[in-house]
Image (cartoon, rainbow, N blue to C red):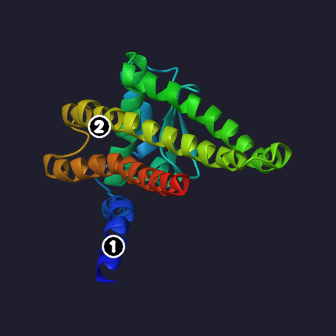
């Protein structure tokens, strides 16, 4: 019984721990700062213009900060777009880092974008197979038909893990090889804020660590079912 509890706590820590830590870090530095001359959205626009990336837009979205390479758009949550917090400034710089990657033809970003498109196709096909499998199994009247939805689910989860794994180095590069040097060189944040900025950038990458762990756990569950 104790072993089961330990395993449950370990799995919870691996899956939810990074997510909770990311939220805590982002929230910790989300207080408005009067010493910042502009908002996250304004900084993103300024940085893009300084880098001659005027074709890249900056948009406010309800939630989910990200860069869309197809639309050539840096998209910031309303809180970070309009905010003057350290979190808003650093997250904006991070997303601009992705725009820099795109502009320089950074291969890992392109690879992730291609994989993401493949993952969407796999998910759609897999979903159709999972829905049609019971009908197919009834027509052929063979036990193997029951394996179709399991195989489809496994394929979907596997693609999810691959996408998350390719995302990690892309996020690290955007944070520490692009955003952080730009913030330091432009003196957009003070030296005393640098440790906190590193924590925010590290937290952004850990979002994908949590997602990767969750996908791996789901795959393990599917493998168990397949063995049955």
Q: Position of residue 101 (x, y in %)?
A: 38, 24
Q: Give the total of numbered labels.
A: 2
Label 2, label 1: how many angstroms apart (C-alpha)?
A: 28 Å
Element at label 2? helix
The residue at which mark 1 appears reads as: 9
Q: Is residue 151 left or right of residue 194?
A: right
For disc 2, the marked residue is 172
* Residue 89 appears in the figure: no
User: Residue 1 or 96: which is nearer the viewer?
Assistant: 1
Q: Position of residue 205 (x, y in %)?
A: 33, 45
Crowding near the residue tagged with mark 1, few <14, some 14–19, many ≥20 C-alpha atoms within 10 Å: few
Residue farthest along the right direction in this orientation: 139
Which quadrant would the C terminus be assigned to in this image?
bottom right
Residues packed near mark 2 inside 10 Å, few (<14), some (14 to 19) or many (20 plus)? some
Of 136 and 184, nearer the camera is 136
Q: Give the residue at x 63% y 40%.
A: 123
Label 1: which secondary element: helix
Asked if the residues shown at circle 2 and circle 1 are in contact, with their CB atoms under 8 angstroms apart, the answer is no
Quarter residue 100 falls in = top left
Left or right: where 205 falls relative to 67:
left
Residue 7 vertical placement versus 169 (above, below): below
Residue 139 in the image, given as x and y percentages of width and height: 85, 44
Q: Is residue 222 visible?
A: yes
The picture places residue 73, in percent across and down from the top left corner, at 53, 31
Judge depth for marks 2 and 1 and give the one in front: 1
The residue at 59%/27% (across/down) is 71
27 in relation to 82, above or below: below
Residue at (24%, 52%) from the top-left corner? 199
């Amino acid at each position: 019984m104790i072993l089961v509890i330990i395993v449950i706590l370990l799995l919870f820590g691996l899956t939810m721990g990074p997510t909770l830590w990311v939220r805590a870090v982002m929230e910790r530095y989300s207080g408005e700062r009067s010493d910042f001359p502009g908002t996250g959205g304004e900084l993103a626009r300024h940085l893009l213009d300084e880098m001659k990336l005027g074709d890249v837009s900056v948009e406010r979205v309800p939630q989910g900060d990200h860069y869309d390479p197809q639309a050539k758009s840096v998209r910031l949550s309303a809180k970070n777009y309009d905010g003057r917090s350290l979190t808003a400034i650093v997250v904006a710089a991070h997303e601009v880092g992705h725009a820099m990657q795109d502009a320089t033809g950074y291969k890992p970003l392109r690879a992730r974008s291609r994989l993401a498109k493949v993952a969407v196709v796999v998910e759609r096909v897999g979903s159709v197979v999972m829905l049609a499998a019971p009908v197919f199994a009834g027509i052929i009247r063979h036990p193997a038909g029951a394996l179709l939805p399991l195989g489809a689910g496994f394929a979907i989860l596997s693609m999810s893990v691959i996408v998350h794994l390719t995302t990690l180095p892309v996020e690290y590069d955007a944070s520490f090889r692009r955003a952080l040097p730009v913030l330091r060189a432009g003196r957009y944040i003070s030296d005393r804020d640098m440790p906190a900025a590193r924590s925010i950038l590290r937290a952004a990458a850990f979002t994908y660590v949590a997602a990767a762990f969750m996908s791996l756990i789901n795959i393990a569950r599917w493998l168990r079912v397949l063995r049955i």
